């Protein structure tokens, strides 16, 4: 199982508490995780990445194993620790705004 | 006993305020969608329990929420607003071409007859329709496809389609308004659109009487006379007696003819309300006095309504979707301010009181008159 940590507003929108656990088809990548996340929680479509272009929203970042993956190829395999569930995949909203 | 439900969208969530027909004691619920901007909420005229809300944020984009129980519970519905075909370009602030990009839904207008049909006015300006309760949205491309589209430009708040007025007597006719393109009308159910800006004069654009380019802030009608329209433009309060074919100014003795809101009395088609605002840059009431102005003659002669409203040191704004009327007798009027107050009058404007006063900045106010 892959563990995903969502920012508070998206946990509220998806009506989940704490982490989300997902299984993905094939390798664990940003794209496969987000595909599985959006399939389970359709209300999250468009809130993390653009629905038309699949581009990450500007004020959202992705972290794994204490590294910023936001600018990586979305199809690059994530670390084994994320694939095995030892470490979560973090979706982080920018700490900004009023 | 009949009652009212006021829907207030704010910078940080949605609030639902309910009262009986006396409109004195109010119950406030919310915030719903705490922390998100709620540009607009509106109930279906065909089913008062069906509500739609536009929820958005700079972080997570657009969400549309729907309620089937009058705002007690909500469910997210479809939020994919894809422009039809090649999006094309409009004018940017500096006059250069800029690609059409979806940003948010400014206004949701449920059908007069079908709770599952709703129109959405969006930024960058376009109109979308859902026929399945908000699950799926299709653009009505004839509007953006009007040949003037590349000449539309954003106002200070963005290039938003903020007003959608269906004609109660003709289901094929609808009016919309865009800042800063102007007003448009369809007579074929949204297939094709024509600009209806003849008579508008905007000194801030290169050609003051141009076909498009006018910063229309709001249009209102009385349902018994849908060919008569009232408009609050960036400057000037205007009136049309022929469904927008031509307009004439009715600003008359207003202390300033700038403002955002305009609405019509529920039972008196010639009684109109506006809230003058000082501009171009101040955007607060003249002299620090919050005054609703009423005309009982369809414009030109205006009287200030001040009882219960702050008459000193008041520097709030009232945004374009933040005024509405109920259909009780006497007519109730409601407006919300950027200072977080929602004021109500249960006597057609003679007296006012805040029904809630410390909300986040209010973006929109709608009211439902309940059986």
Image (cartoon, coloured by chain):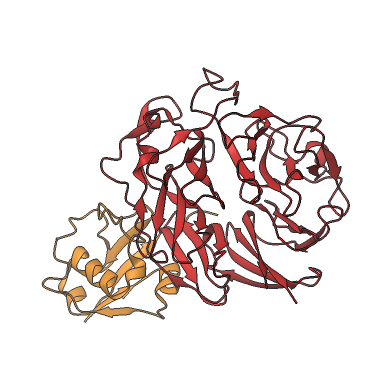
Tell which residue pokes out farthest to the front in this image.
B169
Q: Could you tell whether B169 is left or right of B314 in the image?
A: left
The residue positioned 26% from the left and 40% from the top of the image is B86
> What colour is chain A?
orange
The residue positioned 85% from the left and 40% from the top of the image is B303
Asked if B174 appears above or below B253 in the picture, the reply is: below
Q: Could you tell whether A36 is left or right of B181 in the image?
A: left
Q: Quadrant of residue B300?
A: top right
Q: Nearer the viewer, residue B12 or A81?
A: B12
Q: Nearer the viewer, residue B69 or B206?
A: B69
Q: Quadrant of residue A70?
A: bottom left
Measured from the top left, where is residue B88 in percent x and y? 30, 35
Asked if B142 appears above or below A63 in the picture, the reply is: above
Tell which residue pokes out farthest to the top in this image.
B207
Q: Nearer the viewer, residue B82 or A73?
A: B82
> What colour is chain B?
red
Tell which residue pokes out farthest to the right in this image.
B307
Measured from the top left, where is residue B289 in percent x and y? 83, 43
Specify the quadrant that holds the C terminus of chain B: bottom right
Specify the quadrant that holds the N terminus of chain B: bottom right
Asked if B263 appears above or below A87 in the picture, the reply is: above
Q: How many marks?
A: 0
Q: Nearer the viewer, residue B83 or A47?
A: B83
Asked if A14 appears above or below B320 in the picture, the reply is: below
Q: Is residue A95 visible?
A: no
């Amino acid at each position: 199982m892959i563990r995903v940590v969502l920012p508070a507003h998206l946990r509220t929108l998806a009506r989940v508490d704490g982490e989300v656990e997902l299984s993905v088809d094939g390798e664990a990548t940003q794209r496969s995780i987000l595909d599985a996340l959006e399939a389970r929680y359709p209300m999250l479509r468009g809130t993390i990445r653009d629905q038309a272009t699949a581009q990450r929203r500007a004020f959202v970042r992705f972290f794994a194993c204490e590294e910023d993956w936001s600018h990586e190829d979305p199809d690059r395999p994530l670390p084994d620790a994320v694939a095995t569930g030892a470490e979560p995949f973090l979706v982080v909203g920018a700490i900004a705004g009023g | 006993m009949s009652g009212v439900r006021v829907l207030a969208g704010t910078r940080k969530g949605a609030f639902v305020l309910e009262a009986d027909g006396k409109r004195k004691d109010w119950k406030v619920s919310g915030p719903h969608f705490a922390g998100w901007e709620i540009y607009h909420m509106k109930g279906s005229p065909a089913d008062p329990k069906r509500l739609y809300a536009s929820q958005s944020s700079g972080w997570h984009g657009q969400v549309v929420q729907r309620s089937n129980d009058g705002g007690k519970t909500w469910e997210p519905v479809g939020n994919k607003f894809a422009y039809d075909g090649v999006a094309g370009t409009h004018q940017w602030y500096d006059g250069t071409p800029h690609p059409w990009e979806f940003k948010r839904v400014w206004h949701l207008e449920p059908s007069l007859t079908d709770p599952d049909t709703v129109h959405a006015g969006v930024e960058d300006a376009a109109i979308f329709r859902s026929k399945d309760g908000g699950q799926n949205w299709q653009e009505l491309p004839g509007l953006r496809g009007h040949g003037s589209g590349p000449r539309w430009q954003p106002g200070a708040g963005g290039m938003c389609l903020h007003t959608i007025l269906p004609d109660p007597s003709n289901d094929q006719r609808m009016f919309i308004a865009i800042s800063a393109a102007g007003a448009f009308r369809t007579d074929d159910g949204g297939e094709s659109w024509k600009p209806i800006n003849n008579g508008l004069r905007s000194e801030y654009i290169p050609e003051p009487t141009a076909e498009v380019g006018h910063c229309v802030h709001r249009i209102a009608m009385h349902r018994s006379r849908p060919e008569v329209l009232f408009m609050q433009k960036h400057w000037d309060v205007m009136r049309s007696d022929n469904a927008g074919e031509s307009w004439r100014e009715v600003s008359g003795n207003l202390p300033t003819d700038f403002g955002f809101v305009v609405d019509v009395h529920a039972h008196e088609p010639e009684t109109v309300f506006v809230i003058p605002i000082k501009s171009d840059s101040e955007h607060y009431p003249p002299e620090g006095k919050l005054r609703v102005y009423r005309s009982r003659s369809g414009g030109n002669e205006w009287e200030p309504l001040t009882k219960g409203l702050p008459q000193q040191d008041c520097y709030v704004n009232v945004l374009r979707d933040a005024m509405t009327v109920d259909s009780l007798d006497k007519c109730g009027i409601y407006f919300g301010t950027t200072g977080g107050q929602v004021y109500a009058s249960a006597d057609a404007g003679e007296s006012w009181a805040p029904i809630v006063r410390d909300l986040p900045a209010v973006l929109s106010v709608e009211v439902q008159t309940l059986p």
